[in-house]
Image (spheres, grey):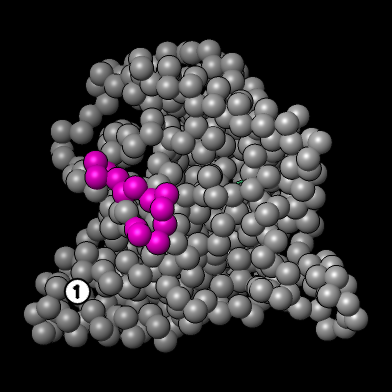
Amino acid sequence: MELLDLKACEIPGLVKDKKVKALDITNAYLKHIEENDETLNAYITVTKQLALEQAKNVDAKVESGEDPGVLAGIPISLKDNISLKDVKMTCGSKMLEDYISPYDSKVAEIIKREGGIILGKVNLDEFAMGADTKTSYFGVTKNPLDPTRVAGGSSGGSASSVAGKEAILSVGTDTGGSVRQPSAFCGTVGMKPTYGSISRYGISPMANTFDTPGVIGRSVEDVLLLLQTLVGKDSHDATSLGNEALKELTLEDDVHLKGLKFALPSLYKNQELDEPIQESFDRVLALLEKSGAKVDIVEMDSLKYVIETYHILVNGEIAPNMSRFDGLRFGHRTKEYTTLEEMYMKSRSEAFGDEVKRRIMIGTHILSLDLSSEYYEKALKVRTMIRKEFETIFKDYDFVLSPTYPVIPYKVEEEMSPVEIYVADLFTVPVNLGNLCGISIPVENNSSLPGGVQIIGNHFKDHEVIKAAFAIERSLQQ
Ligand code: GLN
């Protein structure tokens, strides 16, 4: 049995039937990380001892006839902005280089309880701000499909670890596309569920009304398994609601595409895409047509404003969130200072990278008393307008369809301006602005890099999105 090729959804059964030991799977993954991660740089911290302990615990439960949990023996990586008790949580920043989490996030608590094996903490853009992990203090993560290229971001370590067989599943966070975009880059499946489905307790906030924990895996079925385990209400996060329909979903054989209605915004249809991405997208359009699904071009004017609206609102939330990192309450403290003010200034200047500083400055500027009605309040109104336009579309359609990202993963050394990187998020940010759910699935084309195709569903229609993604994935393999 090739342990690195097992599917997440088959592992718990194999472990319970004593066909394979959790310890053997864990050792195989730890060995692969040791051999491979120097190239990929997916991990910031490998939690070898913890993983071995968890695996032994699972095997002991199986031996004694106890239930080892629904994730028994599945190796999982966590984005390094998710707390894992007694383990470093850096958020990809020098600011938290030495910070140890004193408690488990809800996500980590559930994975441990259900017998999942946490292999470690993976790389991200600094505080999840970015799209290629280049803003990480710990260096860029490479793409396993072509290590001369970036893995995407901000959950680049998550997607790279899954695609590079350094984990089977990973938990990331998605504020404007950070689970879906690296999935598109690395050929993995990535789902951002509806906001509130999974507790954010113990996850370092970037922009609280946007942040959503999400899952990256090698197939829709694998992603579903972890999502279903993580969804739920949590008394520690008042915005968590759970997601019953997703929790109860089973992927039956009769899941099909016939009769489904997809809306394709004209703005998306006319968007210039890199050739392989266009090929992948066209392949899905042809498949949908052949399968009896309907795809209509629709007008959605509000989509023109999503990038500006996203950055005003997100930076408005980022600036106050970053204020806790002041060298006193949390984070790096400068060595030499004479006054308190100097201590704050030097600590923050030394430990934050350029992208984080840029966003704090923009956020502070647009929230200032004389400007907030001009920018922030107006952007809130546009957010409502975007939501309403999606609501109208979802009266007539089941899904909105788009590519996940317009370009293929670029070379590590390629320099992009911040604005070039921001505008490329045009397909992913509406999902966070509109409080919707979205999945990216990899679609092969004539190049060596698959293109990501995104299916967007209405608020709490995650189960429908998963079913459609599963049907497309299966049809593409036939
Ligand atoms: N690329 C987007 C940004 O930098 C998304 C980030 C995210 O989802 N964490 O804002």
* Pointer 1 residue: 68
- Magenta stretch, residue numbers: 234-246
Element under disc 1? loop
Is 238 included in the stretch rendered in magenta? Answer: yes
Image coordinates of residue 12 in percent, x first then y, are 21, 66
For the question of whether residue 364 can be seen, the reply is yes
Image coordinates of residue 148 in percent, x first then y, are 66, 57
- Give the residue displayed 60% in from the left and 54% down from the top: 206
Out of 39 and 21, give the one closest to the viewer: 21
Quadrant in the rendering for residue 441: top left
Q: The residue under label 1 is which amino acid type?
A: Pro
Answer above or below: position of 387 versus 448: above
Out of 152 and 299, give the one closest to the viewer: 299
- Give the residue displayed 78% in from the left and 40% down from the top: 369
Question: What is the count of numbered marks?
Answer: 1
**Which quadrant is home to the C terminus?**
top left
- Give the residue displayed 38% in from the left and 26% down from the top: 399
Image coordinates of residue 357 in percent, x first then y, are 78, 56
Residue that sits furthest to the left in the current view: 65
Is 445 included in the stretch rendered in magenta? Answer: no
